[in-house]
């Protein structure tokens, strides 16, 4: 499956988030992935700005897109108002493909705003904020 295909964008992300949540539930059966509502807040969640959430390891055979062996970011900020407007336009749709196409734009804007590893498909999921972001995409879905 091509996860970049607009027809599969939302369902691919839903499956990916579900599998991560399921894996974490092996340690705590009541665990649910939290989400980051980037429409309500244009700052990174506090749990993602320090400690292992900031510098989680990248797979040993890979390196960070911005250098080193830990998750890197180059957060440039974004407009919650602008992204919120895009989300509202997407939510007003009645067909899945158009909704998916329109939601893909703010989704991608978050990847770009966080920068470095979040912009690199092969290593984006090593950044824990990836999962907070995609849990929100799933919430919107």
Image (cartoon, helix red, strand yellow):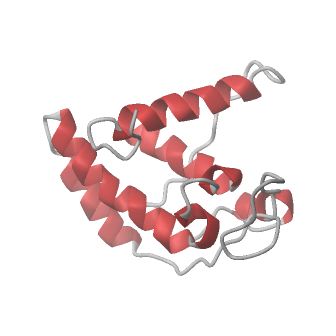
Considering the image in quadrants, where does the N terminus appear? top left
| Residue at point 21%, 34% (across, down) | 96
| Residue at point 48%, 60% (across, down) | 38
Q: Quadrant of residue 138?
A: top left
- Give the answer, above or below, for where 78 lies relative to 96: below
Considering the image in quadrants, where does the C terminus appear? top left
| Residue at point 57%, 27% (across, down) | 18
Q: Position of residue 118 (x, y in %)?
A: 58, 62
Q: Position of residue 14 (x, y in %)?
A: 46, 32
* 35 left or right of 136 in image: right
Count of marks placed on residues: 0
- Which residue reaches farthest left? 94
* 93 left or right of 103 in image: left
- Which residue reaches farthest front? 61
* 102 left or right of 74 in image: left
| Residue at point 40%, 69% (across, down) | 80
- Give the answer, above or below, for where 58 lies relative to 8: below
Q: Looking at the picture, tell me which residue is in the foreground, 80 or 67.
A: 67
* 7 left or right of 95 in image: right
Q: Looking at the picture, tell me which residue is in the foreground, 95 or 45.
A: 95
Q: Quadrant of residue 84?
A: bottom left
- Residue 141 visible: no
Q: Position of residue 139 (x, y in %)?
A: 44, 38
- Give the answer, above or below, for where 129 lies relative to 77: above
- Give the answer, above or below, for where 62 lies relative to 50: above
- Residue 106 visible: yes
């Amino acid at each position: 499956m091509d996860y970049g295909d607009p027809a599969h964008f939302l369902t691919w992300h839903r499956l990916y988030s579900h599998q991560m949540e399921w894996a974490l539930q092996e340690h705590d059966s009541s665990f649910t992935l939290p989400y980051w509502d980037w429409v309500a807040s244009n700052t990174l969640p506090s749990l993602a700005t320090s400690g292992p959430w900031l510098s989680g390891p990248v797979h040993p055979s890979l390196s960070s897109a911005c250098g080193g062996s830990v998750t890197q970011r180059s957060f440039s900020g974004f407009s919650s108002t602008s992204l919120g407007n895009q989300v509202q336009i997407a939510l007003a749709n009645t067909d899945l493909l158009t909704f998916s196409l329109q939601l893909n734009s703010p989704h991608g804007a978050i990847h770009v705003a966080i920068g470095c590893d979040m912009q690199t498909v092969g290593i984006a999921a090593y950044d824990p904020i990836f999962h907070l972001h995609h849990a929100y995409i799933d919430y919107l879905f």
